[in-house]
């Protein structure tokens, strides 16, 4: 599991590469642009998965310390 | 020329300097962003020298900068060597595992992510109008950099495999069998990478001596720079199996980017040594023709032809840059 900070840094780096190569421009379509976008998508999915797992763990933890019906 | 000894910070990141040896090569670990991602950069001489950067990216077999003698020769010809250790090659942080899956390797996303990271390093080092030299397995990322980085004036693909079928050229036979294993199965890769690491740990000189046996120029370079190869062998121990799988697959399997005529409008040249097999040369010539790129053959060396033939390398660079300048002014 990659460190979320590292994933965020890499996404920002890919965004800058997309911008500087003109790949964000809708008229720029190439293999390179689609490869960059594919890498970004994979990293974003991984980051999203990381936060979903973290939320799940947080939910389990709050259930544990505050049982339903407790004071 | 005095070497730089000052600690500094650029681009919001942190970097530390440390000398490789008593020479004018010095290295830094450049932090990218806010996380622990870091890339090792080795530079020769002073930044303010006004020389054109010659940026070198390593092949999997030797994650080390070229010798001081080579760097000094480039310096005298008004080029400043800047070596960048690619992500995952011993010191630099590897690409995250999620990018090193079979699909992201096959569709080029992993290689393109690496190109984006290296472009970020170029940007932070303020490198402009430079010559990019890709060694061996670095070339899959160099093809991409040559096409997306406007700051690359000329790209040299040294010992680029392109989409050749060239496993037969590797010597000795046990090394060739090992390479086949690495791209056929993940289990084979694990065994092969363990085997290479073991051999490199026990006897780096013997290992490199066997792999470089085809070329007197490469063997001479090895003998003159044994300490660098010993350090390279140490760094290889830190390369994860996923990085090896990624790098060898990008080099030894077809890359879908390499379509006919790809380099027609790119300022790039393929570079190889004459001390190799006829099979390699005919395959390389065939691929170069298909991709619309010229090939230059250096008199000495094979895997390390640019390092073994520095005068020839300089001639290729200056001829190409002059031609480019003439085309721009004309």
Image (cartoon, helix red, strand yellow):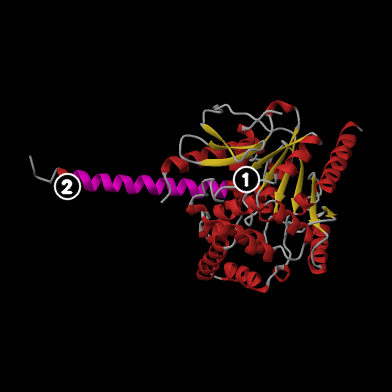
Residue B98 location, x and y as percent?
A: 48, 53
Q: Label for residue B115?
A: 1
Q: Element type at marker 2?
A: helix
Q: Residue at x 85, y 56 (%)?
A: B299
| Disc 2: which residue | A64
Farthest residue, direction left: A71
Q: Quadrant of residue B159?
A: bottom right
Select label 2 or label 1 by which is in front.
1
Front-lying residue, B238 or B258: B238
Callout 2: chain: A
Viewport quadrant of the N terminus of chain B = top right
Q: Which residues are magenta?
A: A37-64
Q: Disc 2 and disc 1: Cα gap in Å?
A: 46 Å
Q: Residues within 10 Å of mark 1 (few under 14, many from 20)?
A: many
Residue B75 location, x and y as percent?
A: 76, 36
Q: Residue at x 88, y 37 (%)?
A: B322
Residue B208 location, x and y as percent?
A: 66, 61
| Camera sees residue B296 | yes
Front-lying residue, B112 or A21: B112
Viewport quadrant of the C terminus of chain B = top right
Residue B169 in the image: above or below residue B83: below
Residue B32 in the image: above or below residue B109: above
| Camera sees residue A25 | no
Q: Main secondary structure of the magenta part?
A: helix
Q: Element type at marker 1?
A: helix
Residue B119 location, x and y as percent?
A: 63, 39
Residue B66 in the image: above or below residue B32: below
Front-lying residue, B27 or A70: B27
Q: Residue at x 22, y 46 (%)?
A: A61
Q: Are marks 2 and 1 in contact (CB under 8 Å)?
A: no
Q: Residue at x 54, y 50 (%)?
A: B90
């Amino acid at each position: 599991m990659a460190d979320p900070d590292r994933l965020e840094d890499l996404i920002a780096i890919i965004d800058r590469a997309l911008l500087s190569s003109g790949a964000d421009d809708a008229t720029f379509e190439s293999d390179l642009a689609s490869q960059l976008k594919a890498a970004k998508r994979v990293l974003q999915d991984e980051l999203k998965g990381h936060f979903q797992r973290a939320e799940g763990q947080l939910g389990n933890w709050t259930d544990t310390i505050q049982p339903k019906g407790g004071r | 020329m005095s070497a730089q000894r000052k600690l500094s910070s650029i681009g919001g990141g942190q970097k530390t300097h440390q000398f490789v040896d008593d020479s004018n090569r010095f290295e830094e670990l450049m932090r990218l962003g806010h996380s622990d991602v870091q890339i090792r950069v080795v530079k020769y001489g002073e930044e303010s020298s006004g020389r054109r950067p010659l940026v070198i990216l390593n092949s999997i077999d030797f994650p080390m900068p070229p010798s001081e003698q080579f760097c000094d020769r480039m310096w005298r010809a008004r080029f400043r060597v800047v070596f960048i250790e690619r992500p995952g090659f011993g010191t630099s942080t590897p690409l995250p595992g999620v990018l090193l899956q079979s699909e992201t390797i096959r569709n080029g996303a992993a290689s393109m992510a690496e190109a984006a990271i290296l472009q970020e390093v170029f940007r932070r080092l303020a490198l402009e109008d430079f010559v990019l030299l890709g060694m061996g397995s670095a070339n899959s990322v160099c093809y991409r950099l040559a096409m997306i980085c406007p700051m690359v004036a000329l790209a040299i693909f040294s010992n680029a495999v392109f989409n050749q079928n060239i496993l037969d050229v590797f010597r000795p036979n046990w090394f060739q069998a090992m390479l086949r294993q690495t791209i056929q199965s993940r289990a084979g890769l694990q065994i092969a990478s363990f085997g290479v690491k073991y051999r490199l740990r026990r006897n780096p000189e013997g290992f490199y001596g066997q792999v470089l046996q085809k070329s007197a120029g490469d063997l001479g370079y090895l003998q003159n720079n044994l300490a660098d190869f010993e350090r390279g062998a140490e760094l290889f121990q830190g390369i994860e199996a996923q990085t090896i799988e990624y790098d060898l697959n990008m080099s030894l399997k077809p890359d879908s980017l390499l379509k006919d005529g790809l380099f027609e409008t790119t300022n790039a040249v393929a570079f190889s040594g004459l001390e190799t097999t006829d099979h390699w040369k005919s395959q390389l010539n065939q691929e170069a023709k298909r991709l619309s790129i010229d090939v230059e053959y250096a008199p000495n060396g094979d895997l390390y032809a640019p390092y073994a033939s520095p005068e020839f390398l300089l001639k290729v660079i200056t001829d190409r840059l002059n031609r480019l300048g003439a085309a721009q002014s004309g």
